Image: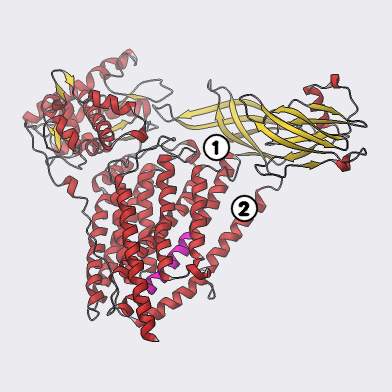
Amino acid sequence: LTAVEDSLFFTAPFPVSRTGMTDQTVMMLGQNESHRFYPLQLYAFKGNMLVLSKYFSSGKISARPISRQEGQTNDAILMELIHASGSSEFLLWGKQGYAGTPVLLEQENSNLLISYGSLYKDISFELKLNDFIIQRYPGSNSPSWFESRVTLTDSNRGIHEQRRIFMNNILKYKGYRFYQSSYTSDERGTILSVNRDWAGTLVTYAGYFLMALGMMLSLFNANSRFRTLSHENALLKAAKKSLLLLVAIISFQGVPFAQDPRSSVAVEPVDQEHARLFGRMLVQDNGGRIKPVNTLSSEVLRKLSRKSNYNGMTPDQVFLGMMLDPTAWQHEPFIRATHPQIQEIMGSDDKYFAFISFFRDDNYILHDHVERAFHKKPALRSKFDNEIIRLDERVNICYLVFTGELLRILPRSNDSTHTWFSHQGIQGKVDLEDSVFVENIIPMYLQDVQQSMKTADWKSPEEILGAITRYQEKYSGDLMPPPRDISLEIFLNKSDIFDRISNYYGIVGFLLLLLQFIALFYPRIKLKIPVIISIVLIIIIFMIHTTGLGLRWYVSGHAPWSNGYEALTYIAWATVLAGLIFSGRSSITLSATAVLAFLILHTAHLSWMDPQITNLVPVLKSYWLVIHVATITASYGFLALGALLACINILLMVMQTGKNYQYINLTVRELSNIIEMTLIAGLYLLVIGTFLGGVWANESWGRYWGWDPKETWALVTVLVYAFIAHMRMVPGLKGVYTFNLASLLGFSTVIMTYFGVNFYLSGLHSYAKGDPLPVPSFVYYTLVIIFVIALVAFINYRRLERDNASQDR
């Protein structure tokens, strides 16, 4: 069944009685070469008319739709038939994807058969499903892989072949393309999407390649706009010797972590060396990923306290201590809660609270607040509601650590799902030969740790850890990562690379900005040495940044831009790369890119971003994740740099006076040229990335474009920046101020594409599934501040421009 959306099919002449019309007859008509079908496409605007005069000898006959009503099972279209003797109306029933019910209209000399819907077509070959295979991540219901094994039979060509269809692997035959879409609920049947591309992908992909090649070559063409801007910038740079900037005060990330809570009940730390060995033991998370306990303990401590250590104790010491002595740790104030209303509920203005303080008179004091918050739609939840939900999650995680339920370290024999359990969850699920071991090993281990804390002899607990590791190897050895991978993941956890380098980016960037601000008003000050030092420092930090991305790629097993946190760290990397590329043309680019990298990485480490390494869904297990996502997110770094430089230019226009007008104007023009160059580079990457996304969509879903919200907003972003790049050709819009304002405001489309679609719209690329979160209040404040600064800059810039023009006359 080939679906033709909103189409009418006419066949004539047709001398047959009304009683002979059946669905089977319609199917036969579709295969009868003596009768042709004439489709009429329906549009939302007027002009839906099909003239049938050339098909009839009785005179001019036309048909047009008047109205359409959609229903659950069928659509009704009211049609008007216009002929020589007048006109008549009739009703058509049908629906996209179904063969419509035909209507026979009798004319004086001929009959007209009209049907609305789809046509059956013989594709002359068959597909038979032999087997459907689905693989899940160990211990999880999430599919890791699913495929269809089919037999392709074409009797006309004598073909009888076995084929495989799985995600990103298509079955192609006679212009048809079969894609693995989904599967039936009983997991015994497959669901394939079908597409027919008569021209094939070669022509389309060749066109994409030529487009990308043309864009790349234009960056090196001596007559291109990009090279012209580069030449103009060299002249401007020769006319001045120092640059600008703004003064910005942004609090560093260390504020939330500056204060350590004090213990109300003393907790004795576990030996650090033994805790390190405990951290190397493997555990399975809820997504099925096998990882070191150190990763789990680091995630738990960050979730509970937003800290990388606690009172000098490592995450492994904290995690093991909570299991070892739950009574003492229940009185330890390390659960973070800073919202004023929550502090009012708790009866204290402290920032950290003990687990036991959330329970009074055997009642959970947050229960009613949590219930009310969850009963609200996400879009209607206040900041207090969201904080209550997060705090409830912290309390629950704390409980799971106390009970040991998070420590899923014990696999079971003959388990096809490769699920690991905690020592409590595995009770009664193993053979008799293992039951004694799994039921007693964790209590025995904790007892021995307590004894070792008194005697300082850690031999027995270490032997138990070795026994657990051997038990894991016995039943899940093929799933366990090698020791080198474990060491690298622990190093990545402890180094906390991206969080640390964000502050270094900020320090270097802000110090350089401060020096440039001073030099702006004191041109005699030379910045050559500070700029060289800054370049060296930023290059070193950038190399560490690159190493961190490489380590995360190796540890996770996939490109480190598959979720929001990873994408932000990669965008920050691309931003610094863009800054280093253009730093030779203006030192302000270097300082701006360092500040921007700091802001992006700071955003990545906010409480609502999850840095956890997760498994990939099947559709993302493709090399296109590396190519498409890397290209399009890299463009965000260039466009973000252009927006920040435009913001700096607008602030410079605010600070312009009659005395420094010429000097500031040269700076603005120089930065404007750099902005345009970064936007051109960013636009090229964005366009190439968008078309690469179309190729990936065609390889995965069988269509290049589906107007998914992410696709739509990517197109909006392309059109907006294409317009900004060509504003100079519009007489009323080619001013420096207008270009900088557009470059700043244009970045809002990138923010909408990256954040807005994920959290406020529903689609194939969305994370929030259509449940929008409240818009943060700082967004509105930012818009008001930008509006005020832009207005002041416009007034001041126009005034000085007029004054300078009158002086020239």
Residue 154 place in picture, x, y as percent: 75, 32
Q: Is 496 in the magenta?
A: no
Side (left or right) of 618 relative to 241: right
Residue drawn at (38%, 86%) of the image = 808
Disc 2 marks a residue whose amino acid type is: Tyr
Q: Which mark is residue 205?
A: 2
Residue 802 at x, y percent in the picture: 38, 77
Magenta highlight range: 669-683
Position of 13 compared to 680: left or right? right
Residue 739 sits above or below residue 40 on the image: below
The answer to whether 410 is drawn above or below residue 544 in the figure is above
Looking at the rendering, in which quadrant would you find the N terminus? top right
Q: Is residue 14 left or right of residue 341?
A: right
Q: Residues within 10 Å of mark 1 (few under 14, many from 20)?
A: many
The total of numbered circles placed on residues is 2
Residue at 18 percent of width and 31 percent of height: 320
Element at label 1: loop
Measure the C-alpha gap from mark 1 to mark 2.
Answer: 20 Å
Q: Is residue 648 above or below residue 127?
A: below
For the C terminus, the quadrant is bottom left
Q: Is the image coloured rainbow, by chain, by secondary structure, or in one colour?
A: secondary structure
Q: Position of residue 675 (x, y in %)?
A: 41, 66
* Whole-percent x, y for residue 736 in the image: 42, 70
Label for residue 402? none
Q: Crowding at label 2, few (<14), some or many (≥20) Cα neighbours within 10 Å?
A: some
Q: Is residue 220 visible?
A: no
Disc 1 residue type (three-letter) = Met
Q: Main secondary structure of the magenta part?
A: helix
- Asked whether residue 673 is drawn in magenta, I would say yes
Q: From the viewer's perspective, is residue 135 above or below residue 671? A: above
- Residue 167 shows which numbered tag? 1
